[in-house]
Amino acid sequence: MSGESETVDDLKIRRWLIPFGSAIALIVGNGAISVFAFGVFIKPLEAQFGWSRATLSGATALCGLLSAIALPFVGLLIDRVGVRRPLMVAIVLFAANVAAVGLSGSLLWFQLLIALTGITGAAQGPIGYVRSISSYFDRRRGFAIGIAMSGVGLGTALIPVYAQWLIGHFGWRVAYAGLGLAILVLAWPMVLAVIREPPNANRGAPTMGGGAATAVSGLRLKEVLALPMFWLLAAAVLFVSVTVNGSLVHVVPMLTDRGWSPGSASSVMVAAGLAGMVGRLLAGFLIDRIFAPHVAMVFFLLAIGGVYGLSTQLYVVPGVIGVGLASGAEVDMIGFLVSRYFGLKSFGQIYGLLFSIFTIGAGLGPYLVGVAFTAFHNYDKALFGLGCLLAAAISCFALIGPYRYKPRQTLTSET
C-alpha cells in the first residue's frame, strides 16, 4: 500500500517538474533571443555598418514570417511524435544558428541568418512546453502554464542585459556566440530531464493519478477555422503582439536617443521582464478562477497606459511595466484559450497556427515602429498607433463568447 502511495507521490512531483523545467528552458526561448535581445544590437550594428533601424528591424520581420510558416508544421509534428524529440533537435539547431549570426560580414548574410532563426527557433518557444503541460493539468492548467511562461519573462529581463554585457566587454560578434551557448546550457538539459508526454497512446489527454487517461476531446483544425471565435482570438493575438514587441524591442534605442547610457537603457528591460514574469504567474492564477477574456481585457487596458508612459520622460519605467504585464498575460492566454475553446485533439496544430500569428506580430511590430521612426524621426506616432491596436484587441475579447471545453470538477489528479 505504501509503495502505491509513493508511486502516486512520484507522479505528482514529476508532473510539477514539467512547468518549472519549462520555465528554465524558456529563459532562452526564441522570443527572448530573437526579439528582445535584438534591441541591444541595433546601435552597435548602426555604428559599425551604418545600417538603418528600419533595415535592421526588417530582419526581425522576416524572422517572424519564417517562424510563422514553420510553427503550424511544428505543431503537427508534436501532435504526431510528441514533444521531446523535436525540441532536443531544435535546441541544437537554434543555438548553432544564433552563434553563426556573429560571423556575418555583410547585410545580406546578417539578414539571412537572423531570418533563419525563425525556422530553427520555432520549436524552442512555448508550443511544445505548453503542449506537455496541458496534457498533465486540467483545473490548474492556467497556473501551470503561468509558471512555465514565467521563464519567458525572466528571459526578457536577463537576456538583453547579458547580451549588453557581452557586447560591452567582447563586441557584438562574441555576444551572439554567448547567446548560442546559453541556449544549449539552459534548454537542452531541461528537455532531456523533465519534459514528458503522458505515458499513453492518446496524446493530449490529461492523466489521472496513476491511472488511465481520459479520452481526447476537441475539434479538428478544419472545424476550428470555421468558428468566428477563432478569428477574434487570432486578431487579438496579432494586435497585442505587434504592440508589445514593437514597443519593447525599441525601448533601448528609444531611451539612448533621450540621452540614457546603453547600460541604463538595457537595464530598463529588467523591469519589462520581471513584469512579464509577474503577469504570467498572476494571469495563470486568475484564469483558473475568472473568465480568461475578462482577465485579458484588464491586462491590455494596463498596457494602453504603459504605451502612453513610454512616450513620456517621467513614466518610462511604469510604462515598460504596463507593457510587460500584457506580454506575460498574452502568451499565457494563447495556450490556455486553445485548450478551453478548441480542446486538445489538434492542440499542436491550432496552437501552432495562433502562435505563428503571434510571431508575425513579433516581427511586424518592431519593423513598423522602425519604419515610423525613420519616417518621422521620433516614436510618437508609432506609440499612438500601438495604443489603438490594444483597444481593438480588447474589443475582440469582449466578443469572443463562453468556453466550449470547461474544466473537470475534480482536482484529484493535480493536488
Image (spheres, rainbow, N blue to C red):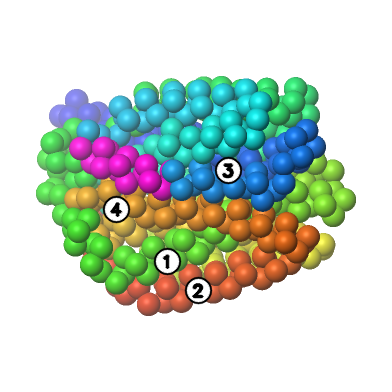
Residue 228 image position (x, y, % from top left): 29, 72
Distance from disc 4 to disc 1, alpha carbons, whole Å, reads 14 Å
Q: Nearer the viewer, residue 77 or 60?
A: 60
Residue 62 image position (x, y, % from top left): 51, 45
Q: Nearer the viewer, residue 60 or 193?
A: 60
Write down the region rendered in magenta.
67-80
Please report whichever mark, 3 or 4, sits nearer to the chain's N-terminal start.
3
Please report whichever mark, 3 or 1, sits nearer to the chain's N-terminal start.
3
Q: Secondary structure at mark 2?
A: helix
Residue mark closest to the camera, 3 vs 4: 3
Residue mark closest to the camera, 3 vs 1: 3
**Three-letter amino acid code of the residue under disc 4:** Ile
Distance from disc 3 to disc 1, alpha carbons, whole Å, reads 23 Å
Q: Is residue 126 left or right of residue 368?
A: left
Please report whichever mark, 4 or 1, sits nearer to the chain's N-terminal start.
1
Q: Which residue is mark 3?
A: 59
Q: Secondary structure at mark 4?
A: helix
Q: Secondary structure at mark 3?
A: helix
Residue 72 image position (x, y, % from top left): 32, 46
**Three-letter amino acid code of the residue under disc 1:** Ala
**Three-letter amino acid code of the residue under disc 3:** Ala
Please report whichever mark, 3 or 2, sits nearer to the chain's N-terminal start.
3
Q: Quadrant of residue 38?
A: top right
Q: Which residue is mark 4?
A: 350
**Three-letter amino acid code of the residue under disc 2:** Ala
Confirm or deny contact between disc 2 and disc 4 (CB under 8 A): no
* Residue under the image location 61 percent in, 44 percent down: 36
